Image (tube, rainbow, N blue to C red):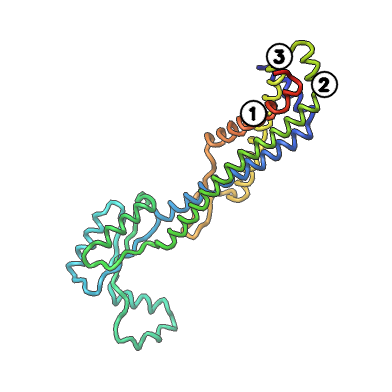
Amino acid sequence: MGYFAVKAARNFSRNLLVNGICVATIAIAVFIFSATLLLFLNASAVVEHAARGNRLIVYLRDTALPVDVERVMLALRAQSEVESVEYTSKDRALADFKRSLGPAAGLLEGLEMNPLPASVDVTLKPSAGGLRAVEALAGRVSAMDGVESANYGREVFERLERFMRFLHRLGIGVAVLMVLAVIFIVANTIRLNIYSRREEIEVQQLVGAGGWFIRAPFLMEGAMQGLLGGLLAEMLLLAAYAVVAGAGRSLVTPFGEIRSQFLSPAALAGFAAASTVLGGLGSWLSLGKHIKKFIPQ
């Protein structure tokens, strides 16, 4: 195995330009997929952060009695996801609204009745869980007597979920293209290498070298191309991550500042292993098609 690895490395250096272009192209393909996965990972973190830091606004019916309001408050405090609750009466809601309007508050002086509902502002614990937990809590609260509705920014979360589904489909498509691209690139590079070393192959055949003895260096060479391409892609990804995330490794989002995430060591090792396997597969496919012209089956 060591002999084949050394021979593959020697052959790689002999065709450095062709193999270098192959490695660079593999790196671009792997980089695009890994960047898509990294974007999906951080987008998921944004969604979860938004859900954990979300506030639930419970709007009460105008017909709700004081006993109904107290019952709702007690029920909310009993929820494990809830950190605090604050009641806002109709009069206070109108006063806050006028204060927010500033000089334009005079436009509301002609109101004959207060159109704003009383509400309960619910602050969720950081450990409340993700979007599903917030949805479940909103559903339970909406079913309480005296409650008109519970608003947790559903429209925003639905848009985020649609974006996540798009990223998921995009990731699958990019993964398929990456696999095909790596196999195609390596197969064609090995084909060129086979024809550039056809005289060497014929000499090995004449001195009695077996088929696998001749094939093994090409297989190792394809795997080496895949490995180097994967490692180069990871270095490019790390450099891009350092530039985008900055020294603080944090992302500023509409839901606050969150710590950005990078791919785990296991994921990086998986990328390198996968690109190595794909490189070997591309080499094997190319050998099966082209080297039989020089080696009797």
Query: Which of the 4 quarters of the picture holds residue 135?
Result: bottom left
Query: 109 above or below 203?
Result: below
Q: 31 and 165: which one is in front?
A: 165
Give the residue furthest to the top.
208
Image location (x, y in percent) of residue 192: 77, 31
* Label 2: few (<14), some (14–19) or many (≥20) C-alpha neighbours in 10 Å: few
Q: Is residue 55 left or right of residue 19?
A: left
Q: Is residue 45 visible?
A: yes
Q: 187 and 150: which one is in front?
A: 187
Q: Is residue 16 left or right of residue 97?
A: right
1 vs 2, front mark: 2
Q: Is residue 238 visible?
A: no
How far is mark 2 from mark 3, CA to CA?
A: 16 Å
Query: 19 above or below 122?
Result: above
| Precedes in sequence: disc 1 or disc 3 | 3
Q: Is residue 77 left or right of residue 252?
A: left
Report the disc number at residue 280: 1
Where disc 1 sits, the SS reads helix
How far is mark 1 from mark 2, CA to CA?
A: 23 Å
Q: 95 and 66: which one is in front?
A: 66
State which quarter of the image contains the C terminus.
top right
The residue pinned by badge 2 equals 199
- The tally of labels here is 3
For the point 76% across and 28% down, the residue is 193
For the point 60% across and 30% down, the residue is 277
Image location (x, y in percent) of residue 222: 68, 29
State which quarter of the image contains the N terminus.
top right
Q: 286 and 71: which one is in front?
A: 286
Query: Which of the 4 quarters of the picture holds residue 151?
Result: bottom left
Report the disc number at residue 210: 3
Label 2 sits on what residue type? Glu
Label 1 sits on what residue type? Gly
